[in-house]
Image (cartoon, rainbow, N blue to C red):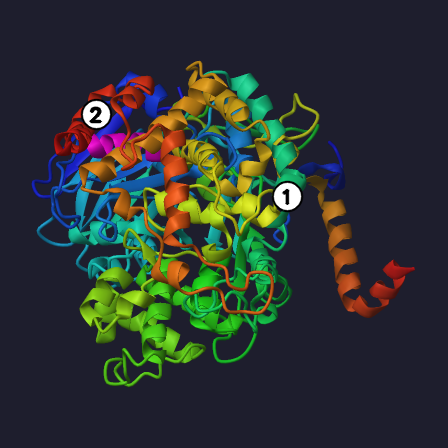
Amino acid sequence: MAAVSKRKFVSADPEKCVGCAVCEYACSFEKEKLYNPLKSRIRVVRLHPLVNLSVTCRLCEEPPCVAACPRDALKQSEENGVIMIDEDKCNGCGWCIEACDYGAITLHPETKKVFLCDLCKDKEKPQCVAWCPEEALDFVTSDTLAQKARITAVKKLFQEAMKTASSK
Amino acid sequence: MGYAGRILHVDLSTGKTETEPLKEDLEKKYIGGIGLGMRLFLDHSKPGIDAFSPENPLVFITGPLSGTMGPTAGNGYAIISKSPESEGIGESKAHGFFGSELKRAGYDAVIIKGRAEKPVYMWIDDDSIQLMDAKSLWGKSPEQTEEAIRKELGDYYIRVASIGTSGEKLVRFACVINDRTRAAGRTGMGAVMGSKNLKAVAVRGTKDVKVAKPEEFKEFVKLLHERMKGPATRKYKTLGTPENVLVLNSLGVLPVNNFTRGTFDGAEKVSGEYLNERFVAKIIGCSSCAMRCEHIAVVPEGPYKGTATRMEYETLWALGPNCGVDRLDAITKAAELCNFYGLDTLSAGGAIGFAMDCYEHGILTKKDSDGLDLKFGNHEAVLEMLKKIGTREGIGNILAEGVKRASEKIGKGAEKFANHIKGVEMTGYDIRGLKTAALGYAVSFRGADHNRHGAYAPDVKGSVNRFKAEKGRGKLVREIEDLYTIIDSMIVCKFSRGVYPDAFGDLAKYYTLDTGITMTPQELQKAGERINNLGRLINIREGFTRKDDHLPPKVMNVPIPDEGVSKGAHVTQAELDLLLDDYYETRGWTKEGVPTIEKLNEIGLEDLDYIIKPKLEKPTKKK
């Protein structure tokens, strides 16, 4: 199995995300050649003009959705951590939907099977990431996210010094 | 493809609803948005009805691109009805998320007639249409209404377009607001909703939206995304429309104190630069858009600390410089109050500026103003007045009628200060010193407006002499008008107009890839002309004549007094006549501004000749 730190998933930067939903359209088009947020594997939440974030599968370590499935229809890929669904086994019961803390799994309105982000495995990178006009979506490992957070925190602490550093 | 192919009819009096297929021949001829909306309005209304009559149809309409990934066009909708302000055609557009949801519910248009016995809201849940009790929503702001409906129906993704108290109380310039901060602002569409006892339209659509040429469409969208990242949209992504404050001020055409002056002493303090540095917390975007234009201003300190609202130039101008107010915190608070009561910020600021002008000239006194000191610059008075107008209390009850009707009620020469065209309050360009724009404003079918023609552009850019009224301006205005009606029929956002450098060419391609209906640039331009004529014909049906293509009294009678480039500028009757003659001629209309039979035949509106026949016969009889 790939080391957890090598596992890449799609993450939205709350500082950058403006809630435009381009990711939803890009996703439903990539997967089904049509436009419908209900068929998107990534969903936007805007709670207030200043509170926006896209949310999708985070490829959890020990994913609760897999554990919750009474029919063993969900499996985590050892190669890249993606949650794979055996459509023959899935009967749309929704235990996995309930188990997911991020609302990343939904029931497909037509197939009545659950579906979620597969990282657009046939493409160079996930299409939501490719299309995001704000570059708010990253295809990253948790290690990279932690690194970014550390750097941002340190920059904030040393605001004055940073100004000098960047002016040189 | 592109279109949902379905129109929903709702009669609020009987509660009856039915759907009919959208006639295919209407699609290519009228596109969608205001074009198709005005045609549907015309076909479903009788001439001469009162705007507040149950018979007045209220049309909610999407565009052919609504619900697709097309940036800006994917999320728009328009509202069309007879305007309670102009008593001619009323139309307004809004973006956000509502338009795409309505398309996904499977409708190109919803035509609402009648009047509900009690306050209701309409719940469109795909194919199911219900009229729900809105008793508990009455008196709520649009934002509160949105939240209450989502809670009641238990679905976060429901999109709502609703009115505030001003719409309920038939304030003639009440607007409709969706997604908290997006307004279909102008021409009083919210008041028409109120007259029907319709508090809100709530939509949840789960259907697929497909385009005719998916892969090519995707590539075209990608190209638009690239262009949107470039210089074509720079203004909207950086300072935003408030950039205009200093630009117009330097040209001496920033209307101040109800068009008393053309420059503002407090311009720096209300500039886009100042706003962005101290107030803008985030710039957000609408559904499916690759631009970010929506500047969310948050007041950082002082008595209005924490007030948060969207801020654009026109709102900032109307509630700021037009009322002499040079405090952005108070302007932000005023904008928030307009959203709370559901008032069109432009007309609300216009009405208060008018009242202040009357007060300064002794036409209104403290007795009339319920004790308020209505001096220009009194920001507290502005906030109080918004409340009075939004609830029709005291003097607010008179101003709620709009400046035209209010000035008639007040009398004593108040008309001299009533800056409106066709009953619709002015917008933030001092057209005394922008004469191409002056023509555009005069002939705009929805009344005073910069968005029907954008004819300030050649004036401001200096490609023409902006102080001169001369032949040729008619053609300039006509050409931009024809493009702008297409923009509003596809409901493309005007902020994105720079990403279609080949104007009709780009837009025709966009349309064809989406709908599968072959459209050439020439055909699209012709459709633009057709739709402009359609707006004109509706107004003619409602009794409009050349006299209604007028300019506000101060624009014609009071030269710009400020020292500087624009000093002395104003538009004389002779100049206006020259401009109108030139424009009518280039449009192929008579001297009275009536389209000829030949023109109607040429643009495929021959079935509407019944509107103009009586008008064309008159002059020959006189001979």
The one of B291 and A55 positioned closer to us in this rendering: B291
Locate residue B539: give its quadrant: top left
User: What mark, if any, has residue B608 been given in the picture?
Assistant: 2
Element type where label 1 sits in the image: loop
Q: Residue A138: x, y in percent? A: 68, 41
Queried whether the magenta region covers residue B426, the answer comes back as no
Is residue B590 something one can see in this rendering?
yes
Element type where label 2 sits in the image: helix
Query: Outermost residue toward the front?
Result: B623
Subunit under mark 1: A
Q: Residue A23: x, y in percent? A: 56, 36
Is residue A42 something one can see in this rendering?
no
Q: Is residue B264 above or below residue A134?
A: below
Residue at the image point whose x is 31% and y is 72% from the top: B387
What residue does disc 1 label? A134
Q: Amino acid at mark 1?
A: Glu
Quadrant for the C terminus of chain B, please.
top left
Queried whether the magenta region covers residue B36, the answer comes back as yes
Q: Amino acid at mark 2?
A: Leu
The one of A104 and A3 positioned closer to us in this rendering: A104
Mark 2 to mark 1 CA distance (whole Å): 48 Å
Q: Is residue B234 left or right of residue B77?
A: right
Locate residue B361: give its quadrant: bottom left
Q: What span is in magenta?
A: B34-43
Q: Is residue A12 left or right of residue B142?
A: right
- The majority secondary structure of the magenta stretch comes to helix
Query: Outermost residue toward the right?
Result: A168
Q: Residue B403: x, y in percent? A: 28, 63
Q: Is residue B608 above or below residue B518?
A: below
Subunit under mark 2: B
